[in-house]
Amino acid sequence: MVRFIDDHRADYGVEPICRQLPIAPSTYYEAKAQQADLTRRAARVQRDEVLRAEINRVWKTNRCVYGARKVWRQLHREQHPVARCTVERLMRELGIAGAVRGRRVRTTVPDLVAARPAALVQRQFAATRPNELWVADFTYVATWAGLVYVAFVIDVFSRRIVGWRASATMRTDLVLDALELRPDVPVRGGDPDAGAPDPALHAHRGCLRACLAGKGVPPLARGYHGSAAPARV
């Protein structure tokens, strides 16, 4: 509000603007006085200004890799008693953070321009018989040896994993192999002669859907949850 009044006080004046805003003229003038004289600020605000400079100095001195915990410990070594939560708060306000080991992994890459057909499941994850509804997902697990990517398909009725694959690389074959079911898992929802429908498959957005489309599953609504009735695998 103070900045807004500064921008328009030359045209309308301080008091008329304050009458339209939830701020008293005395509050505005006090804020301006504190900007000109730092000693008029609250003790916590003054201390925060000093700590911001110290935190920024420690962070830059250590190649911008220290997080809140290491900055906090370094300040204590230098005889700057401060709470760790205060260091975390001020680092957030400064927009600085420590380096994070490893790399960020994205298994969901939505296609914002692709067609988005309506979802068949409508997030109603309930089934009355086996192989009526399957759900599929694609994720990763961090291990000491590195990242392991896992794709799996679960039958909603039995909660049984009907297909899964794990790999050290995020490739299309990983997702497609999850649909290569074991021989003891029927593909159709019942007796083919009885005309039982194929199970509906619900998959999350991103690369999993693109891979399923390449397997013969109609394209799903990328960018949203969605579902489709797949062709036989």
Image: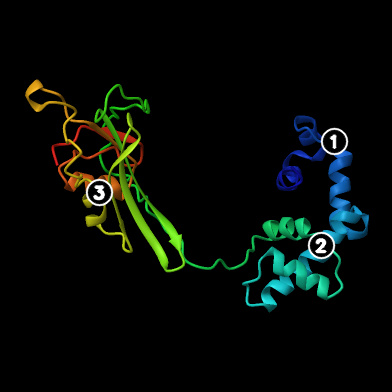
Q: Is residue 66 above or below residue 196?
A: below
98 in relation to 205, above or below: below
Image quadrant in which the C terminus is located: top left
Gap between marks 2 and 1, in whole Å?
26 Å
* Count of marks overlaid on the render: 3
Residue 171's x, y, as percent? 26, 59
Q: Position of residue 74 (x, y in %)?
A: 76, 73
Report the front residue among 121 and 36: 121
Q: Report if the CB atoms under discs 3 and 2 are less than 8 Å apart.
A: no
Q: How far apart in space, not on screen, are marks 1 and 3 (Cα)?
A: 66 Å
> Is residue 78 toward the left or the right of residue 70 in the image?
right
Residue 202 has which mark?
A: none
**Which residue is tagged 2?**
49
Given residues 12 and 105, the one toward you in this image is 105
Q: Position of residue 116 (x, y in %)?
A: 28, 36
Q: Which residue is mark 3?
A: 178
Helix, strand, or loop for circle 3? loop
122 on left or right of 35:
left
Residue ID for mark 1: 24
Q: Residue at x 10, y 22 (%)?
A: 195
Whether the residues at callouts 1 and 3 have beta carbons within 8 Å, the answer is no
* Real-space CA distance between mark 3 and mark 2, rounded to the nearest whole angstrom: 56 Å
| Residue that sits furthest to the left in the current view | 193
Which amino acid type is shown beneath numbered disc 3? Ala
Q: Residues within 10 Å of mark 3 (few under 14, many from 20)?
A: many
Question: Which amino acid is tagged 1?
Answer: Ala
Sooner in the amino-acid sequence: mark 3 or mark 2:
2
Which label sits in the foreground, 1 or 3?
A: 3
Q: Residue furthest front?
A: 184
Q: Residues within 10 Å of mark 2 (few under 14, many from 20)?
A: few
